[in-house]
Amino acid sequence: MANKLQKYIKDLPNGFKITAVPLPGYKQTYTVAMANFGSVDTNLGQGKFLPAGIAHFIEHKLFAKPGYDVSEKFAKTGANSNAYTSYTKTAYLFQTLENPYDNLKILLDLFQHPYFTEENVNSERGIINQEIQMYLDMPEWVLEQRILSQLYPNDPIAADIAGSSESLQKINKDNLLSTYQNGYRPNNMDLVIVGDVDFDRVVSIVEDSPFEKMDQETEIKPNDFLPIGPGGQESMKISQSRAAFGIRIDTKLTGYELVKYQYILNMIMETLIGESSTNYQSMTNKNIIDDSFSYNVVAENDYCFIIVSGSTNKPDEFQKHLQDYFLNNDLKDVLTEEKFERIRRDAIGAYLFAQNSPDAIANQIAELQFYDVDYLQLIQLLNSITLDEVLAASKEIFKENKFTYYNLIADGK
Amino acid sequence: MREVLAKNVVLNVKPLTQFRTIKIQINFLRPINKDESTKRRLLANVLSNSTKKYPSFKAINDREMELYGAEVNAYTRSLLNFNDLGFSVEFADPSFLIGDTDQVENNLDLLGDIIFEPNLASDTEFDSTAFNVEKRNMMSNLQAVQDNQDLVSMLELSKLIHQDEPNKLIPIFGNEDQLRDLTNAQLLDYYHDAIANDFVLINVVGNVDPEKFANLVKDKFSARLLKQKRNDLSIKFEKFDKLIADPAHGQDKKEVNQSRLAIGYYVEKIDKEFSHLAPQAMNLILGGDDQSQLFLQVREKNSLAYSVSSSYSPNNHLLTITAGLDAKTIKQAMDLIEVQLDFMRSGKFTDEQIEHAKKVLFTRRQISSDNIQHYIMRSIWESVYPKAMLSEEAYKAELDKLDRKHIIAVANNLHLIADYKLIGE
């Protein structure tokens, strides 16, 4: 057996977690700092919500500092920097050939020292508004929001991660700062470096760069979910119709068990509708789906759902076929021992593929740590899943009152 | 290790233990022909749908999963003036698996089955399910192009740029009219022609023994690859004199939220010694990253666009500027783009900007070797167009010598040849 990945870990007293993973043979160092805070974290309780898009706005505006932009500093060292916001996480990253320590200091400055002014907040609104307009032209993106608004009616997850033109108007320097102070506490963040670094030096740099003193924490409340929506459709000026079938799973699982559950759900979906399923072939042959057909299993924090989607000329048949199939088929008829072994092998392969990529390693470690899962132990997690567990899980998720749908009907162009 | 297995059949093996996977890729090349682009794309899809041994899409997917999630890819793309029909399989390095020592041979067999053992209904046609499903999928994908506004605007710009090169007027991924008329029998005829006559490149990168791998390829593919007289490749470059004298303009209106702008320039070669890196440095300062003039002036300072950038393609010497913006600000953005070009032509950029560009070019070059595909692409270029390749030393030397006057010279030899506006309404 070839060498496995190794990692070094340091948990600081303030709760900030630092991890380094050497990757022999690679020239780059890739570093990500992640906050366990994303676009859905807007519920202040008592019916009060932060404006949609505020996490993404913070991500954009943290680059601005008094008299400089952090990306300039990264650029001077030749590093490539970026950031992204998801439903539940915000991440800041750089990739560099040299000076990992100087770049680490720049990264710490980036997320530790907010500088929000009326002027820089106003100028960012125009840019983000253009970003929102760009996504509105993408039918897959629009469809995802529509199906989420059926799965979780009136919930922050159904809003665009970047917000809307209206919600952007409600974002200002004051709510940006208070939201930042809440979401970017050291015990709500971690940092992962993949590359050839001196770990003690990394730890020392982080320790010498303390977080700013935060105001008292405001608790972000979990969202109370309304009953699932009945489904719907709308016409859109596109050349092909798109359909999405949604399944909501209300689970109390958290941490390691939730991550394991996500693997189990993926195994169920691969067996029932994946490219290696009889059903996929049957839907293709009946011209209900094309090769854009796919499924996405999401299991994080309070949200657990599956979206099955694709382009289709027959959106009604698409929905009917999936509903009938999920309700009337027993997984044990198709998930044989042999099939189960293939799926397990496929997942092991995917794990090794990801290890070719410093960014995949860093981002997965950073994210999984919030679920108390050790990325280097994922094979053990996979091997711990039994066929019986998968069969049992499938009995719980296919219930008609947890299904919904949304169609975007092509209105020509 | 590089070995010419037969005339115009080249094998390259790059043994490396850096990666967790091994990748085998086989490319078939011939000049781009407008009557063949659609066929080649459908051929890639039909061949990877199923094979004689794995006669359904499900069967081939089951096999990929058995092989620890092997990733099979079949595609076409343009490479200089060639249509590159490529097939690859990437799979887990067996030294990371317990007890699976036949991974390399099993995956090579799978790739061989896909290319040389198609799923046929008869001597004259592919299996009808494979053909019909893939034709329908491809038609659906071609129709979906219209829902991707960035791609639409780039394709329209490409039509304007290549208006005198009919073979490039059909996108490399084909078009709906040609696809509609294409029959199963025609595609199988074309398959025999392509497999027998195209220039062939075989590459493998990863933890393999070069000699053993070469012997495997010869054993398995000798009859299919090594007995034919294959065509030579001849490189041709397009000329844009007519468009330089009289640039082409295009514009469409469409019900979309964001308007798109795409502008094409031809970069005239000015100095052989700096022909590789001077245009790339100029492009970086103009619009190549988030420190560029376009990003800082058009997006950050004036909030006119979320996306605005330039890219340079060294193979055809074309520089493209693209932007996504509000319809009302197109004129303002175009004026501002012109201001940035003047800024470059008059050499107003700082020494720091030059240093930054050089640093980014060096970093990108170095970091690219962290990707398995980098080694395959280098090997392809070495076989197809070695002149385009710079060694590490030559790259560093050209970069070290590169200065302000070379970048200014490139900017002053940048010729507008076409622009396209997709106006949202």
Image (tube, grey):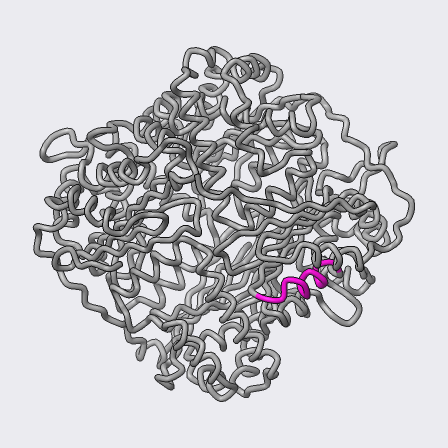
Indicate the quadrant containing the N terminus of chain B: top left, top right, bottom left or bottom right. Answer: bottom left
* Magenta span: chief secondary structure: helix
In depth, the one of B165 and A183 nearer the eye is A183
In depth, the one of B247 and B370 nearer the eye is B370
Using the rendered image of the protein, determine whether residue B291 is visible from the camera's viewpoint. Answer: yes
- Residue B402 point in image, percent of width and height: 47, 83
In depth, the one of A94 and A197 nearer the eye is A197
- Residue A337 point in image, percent of width and height: 41, 16
- When asked about the image quadrant of residue A257, the answer is top right
- When asked about the image quadrant of residue B395, the answer is bottom left
- When asked about the image quadrant of residue B349, the answer is bottom right
Residue occupying the point 52% across, 86% down: B404
B52 on left or right of B171:
left
The answer to whether residue A219 is above or below residue A31 is above
Using the rendered image of the protein, determine whether residue B37 is visible from the camera's viewpoint. Answer: no
The total number of labels drawn is 0
The answer to whether residue B285 is above or below residue A349 is below
The answer to whether residue B214 is above or below residue B295 is above
In depth, the one of B305 and B76 nearer the eye is B76
- Residue B48 point in image, percent of width and height: 28, 38
Residue occupying the point 29% across, 73% down: B387
Residue occupying the point 53% across, 68% down: B288
**A103 in the magenta segment:** yes
- Residue A194 point in image, percent of width and height: 59, 52
A281 on left or right of B27:
right
**A57 in the magenta segment:** no
Residue occupying the point 55% across, 29% down: A380
Residue found farthest to the right:
A216
Tell me where the magenta segment starts and ends, as one range: A98-108
